[in-house]
Image (cartoon, grey):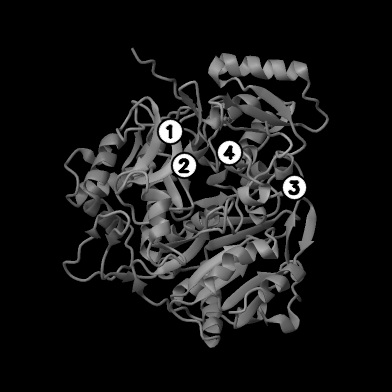
Amino acid sequence: MTTQPHPAWTPPADLVEASVLRDYQAWLVAHGLRPAGAETEPYADLHRWSVERPEEFWGSLVDYFDVPLERPPGAPVLGSRAMPGAQWFPGSTLNYADVVLRHRGDGVAVVLVVEDGTRAELTWEDLRGQVGAVAAWLREQGVGPGDRVAGYLPNLPAAVVCFLAAAGLGATWSACSMEYSPAGAADRLAQLDPVVLVTADGYHFGGRRHDRTAEADQLAAALPSLRARLLVGHLDPAAGGARGASYDEVVAAPVEPAPLPVPFDHPLWVLYSSGTTGRPKGIVHGHGGIVLEHLKWAALHLDLRPGSRFHWFTTTSWMMWNAQVAGLLLGATIVLYDGSPTWPAPDATWRLAEAERLTYLGTSAAYLAGSHKQDLDLAGLDLASLVGVGSTGSPLPESTAAWVNERLPAVWLASATGGTDVCSAFAGGVATLPAVPGEIQAPLLGVALESWDTEGRPVVGDVGEMVVTAPIPSMPVLFWDDADGSRYADAYFSTYPGVWRHGDFVTVTERGSLVVHGRSDATMNRYGVRMGSAEIYEVVDAFGEVADSLVIGLEEPGGGYWMPLFVVAAPGAVVDDDVVARLRTAIRTDLSPRHVPDDVVVVERLPHTLTGKRMEVPVKRILSGLPPEEAANAKSVDDPSALEQFVALRR
């Protein structure tokens, strides 16, 4: 008999009844798309319909959200279902910027909070006028459909404005945050031959003002395709001079925007793979696919609506920046933050939620784990407006989820899994379902998600590869500089032809929820048992003596298997034999004897990607004999020198 886990959060009846998801269910019944009585049908039934009848489901989102989409009479929702190459809404036109700018009035659209206490707001009318003004300036530079506009910017309203202005002209946007080196940013942006570069003079982080004027100039020099620069004075409003046009001067006089209708799959933006093992891949998403996916995600799975106040801690390089802008599609207020989430104190993000009366707070699993580890006192904060907390970036430890649920029992905590590849989640929150610590509530609507074993068979209650068996509109329209589509096909469809393999190691439970065990390309297979690193990290993270950790499994030439655990001692702590013994005991007790590492190795530091993810695969490659410069792209590592230490640790 299967033991049913006890949910830590059960949605209150008033939240369920007032949720956007319930409203959508009632709308489906009223419009004849679901039978009478389905207004309150179980989520599993609604999800089943959404994947079995994709034309009805995705078409319904256009009407429910009143998307300004021009669609030829009789044109299908889905012209071809083949993956890769699915054709969504062939012949239809729209523009992402038009969906945002239809919202009018003096309500607040965008808030900027800087860690030094500076605060600014843009109303919907301000946003319209500034987008129109920047678009007019871009047109003067000759920018039009198909051109690329690049940003080297912190998380500012100007980044949102310039993105919307470029999108409105049919140009394609791409950005890197300013902590990237000029070489790292050029690795990404130079691929696109951008014609305009928007740069700021710096950013705030950890109580410091980081002047990046020289780095912005170096990046501009590395982009020979540029026609013009637009300069945002963030640290110094007078910044600019002869290097380019002043953003403040460009937006001084509002201009009425006029977004250009473009094909459904017209390139909206280019995001990038991590680039840890080679040149970052440019991942291109289309206007229409992102509009529908983000409306679905933000409204039906985060429960956002007009009047919501939405913040996700991010930089302009992470897909969560693009996802946060999605709040504007719904008429919600987005709250941007320039600074460190833990400065001047570890609870800085929670205090932001209090001060800005956030409805929904998005953050990383690492930040929540840090809050848990330090056992932050949240009781003294007024978080009455907070409905939901979202977690992404890596698997959320069960113990951390339980801690958040205990400290904030009225708040809906929803972990998610997805990726830059689709700029959204495959599985995440559902406001009408209970939440169990350590689990993701359910696959998102329209996502035909399964877990497959090594034979390509669906499995429930056991670990497997996460796959998506049917297309969704926000899958990439192409990879940049991939004329024959071979790199795109190889990235997702080489293992199971016609089926998207995402590279995550998951369990789909009998209740339809999801447990993520880590990346399958870093999966350990020890004595015939496949293990994910995430479950080991959850145990290790509970030790106050350990600040960071990384575990890999390595097949050895003689048929042996070596599974070392690398740890970094917390400031002021020592990882001695006693701590190592307690680590081994905890892993054996909480997981199994097979999860216990062969060696626990103390190192000074560990490498991460520029978005903070552990670099398991490059470390494994170095320990297998590859030189560090071949195992990882140094420009995609937060501390390239951290890779060198693993050369001496080879066996």
> Hey, what amino acid is under mark 2?
Thr
The image position of residue 265, as x and y in percent, is 35, 66
Q: Secondary structure at mark 1?
A: strand
Q: Secondary structure at mark 2?
A: strand
Residue under pointer 3: 641
Classify residue 370 as left or right of residue 192.
right
The residues bearing labels 2 and 3 have C-alpha atoms spaced at a distance of 30 Å
> Hey, what amino acid is under mark 1?
Val
Which numbered marker is on residue 365? 4
Using the image as rendered, state which of residue 508 and residue 119 is in the foreground: 508
Vertical position of residue 197 compared to residue 579: above or below = below
The residues bearing labels 1 and 2 have C-alpha atoms spaced at a distance of 10 Å
> Hey, what amino acid is under mark 3?
Ser
Marks 2 and 4 in Cβ contact (< 8 Å): no
Earlier in the chain: of badge 3 and badge 4, it is 4
Marks 1 and 2 in Cβ contact (< 8 Å): yes
Earlier in the chain: of badge 1 and badge 2, it is 2
